Image (cartoon, rainbow, N blue to C red):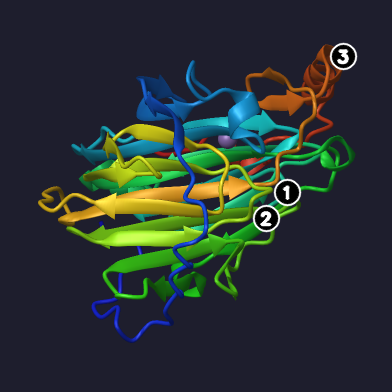
């Protein structure tokens, strides 16, 4: 897992260990992510929304898809061809491999090896999310996540916005003992800020813990707190609940998040790879259907009308028949 992983962590700015008097959040729920196929048939694991962690618990997050990790054979890699979104944001973070993105507003680019694309669909946009042609042709490792972030009612019709957060812009921090690497993609931790611009207060972190490391993070009490194990195993929360790859965690109330890596770790990195995230809940009604997330059923009907009438944009003419004209 390359992501962005410096060889030496001792040189990074250190996060001060929160005082032991602060309350460590307990684990409220653990969700073992079911595996399913998304888009044109690529494998994902989805810890939420799920029976254990629903919209209410994940708020302001709507969905987390763990993409891979898979080793694609040549010709095997698939993506999500042109489709619309309205009413929320999609955040795509690639740890291995590369994804190519194009949208109906002319935006796009390649997301690879530690890059994040933060797309505000807002009022509506069409986009195309595919593995790069090179990855399709030659095959290779593909590992990332896509997170859906809800927007409050007054922002659901915000103009679409595209943030390409190159991996080298991510804020890199180390734990006090320098045995954990904290990649701050968005939000604030210990006085440091990540590069992602968010509409509502949110923190998104990818952390790597050496075997046996213990990471403690001060966490705003008004935020919810979630985690997802990308690879490896460890223990989380005040009660040290055991978790393994593919499990989502919902924390209860408190002031500090505690995460420990198992003392023996295999996998591609021999570390615990964990996504840590939370935010200020929006607490608004959710009407969700496919690629649209709104407040009411009438909003969803309107979204379908607007999509079909081309009011969310149209597929660029040059993209309608990729490969057309080739011999
Ligand atoms: Mn999409």
Residue 101 sits above or below residue 170 on the image: above
Instruction: Judge whether residue 228 can be spotted in this image.
Output: yes
Q: Which residue is mark 3?
A: 298
Q: Which residue is mark 2?
A: 162
Q: Nearer the viewer, mark 1 or mark 2?
A: 2
Residue 159 sits above or below residue 38 on the image: below
State how far apart marks 1 and 2 are (Cα).
Answer: 10 Å
Residue 301 sits above or below residue 272 on the image: above
Mark 3–mark 1 CB contact (< 8 Å): no
Residue 105 circle label: 1
Q: Position of residue 325 (x, y in %)?
A: 48, 38
Q: Residue furthest bottom?
A: 11
Taking the image in four quarters, ligand 1 sits in the one at top right
Mark 1–mark 2 CB contact (< 8 Å): yes
Depth check: 142 or 228 in front?
228
**Numbered disc 2: secondary structure:** strand
Q: Quadrant of the C terminus?
A: top left
How crowded pointer 2 is (Cα within 10 Å; few <14, some 14-19, many 20+) is rated as some
């Amino acid at each position: 897992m390359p992501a962005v992983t410096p060889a030496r962590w001792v040189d990074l700015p250190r996060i001060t260990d929160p005082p032991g008097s602060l309350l460590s959040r307990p684990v409220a729920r653990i969700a073992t992510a079911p595996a399913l196929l998304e888009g044109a048939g690529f494998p994902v694991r989805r810890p939420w929304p799920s029976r254990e962690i629903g919209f209410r618990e994940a708020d302001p997050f709507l969905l987390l898809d763990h993409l891979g990790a898979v080793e694609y054979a040549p010709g095997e890699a698939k993506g999500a061809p042109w489709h619309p979104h309205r009413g929320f944001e999609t955040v795509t973070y690639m740890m291995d491999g590369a994804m190519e993105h194009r949208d109906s507003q002319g935006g796009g680019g390649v997301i690879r090896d530690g890059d994040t694309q933060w797309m505000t669909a807002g009022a509506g946009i069409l986009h195309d999310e595919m593995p790069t042609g090179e990855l399709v042709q030659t095959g290779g490792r593909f590992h990332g996540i896509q997170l859906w972030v809800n927007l409050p009612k007054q922002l659901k019709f915000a103009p679409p916005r595209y943030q390409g957060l190159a991996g080298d812009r991510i804020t890199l921090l180390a734990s006090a003992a320098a045995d954990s690497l904290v990649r701050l993609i968005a939000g604030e931790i210990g006085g440091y800020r990540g590069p992602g611009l968010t509409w509502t207060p949110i923190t998104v972190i990818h952390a790597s813990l050496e075997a046996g490391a213990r990471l403690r993070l001060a966490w705003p009490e008004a935020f919810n707190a979630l985690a997802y194990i990308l690879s490896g195993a460890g223990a989380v929360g005040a009660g040290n609940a055991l978790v393994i790859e593919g499990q989502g965690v919902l924390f209860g109330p408190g002031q500090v998040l505690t995460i420990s890596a198992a003392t023996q770790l295999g996998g591609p990195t021999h570390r615990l790879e964990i996504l840590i995230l939370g935010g200020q809940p929006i607490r608004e009604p959710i009407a969700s259907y496919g690629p649209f997330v709104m407040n009411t059923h009438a909003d969803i009907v309107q979204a379908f009308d607007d999509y079909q009438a081309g009011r969310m944009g149209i597929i660029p003419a040059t993209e309608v028949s990729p490969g057309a004209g080739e011999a």
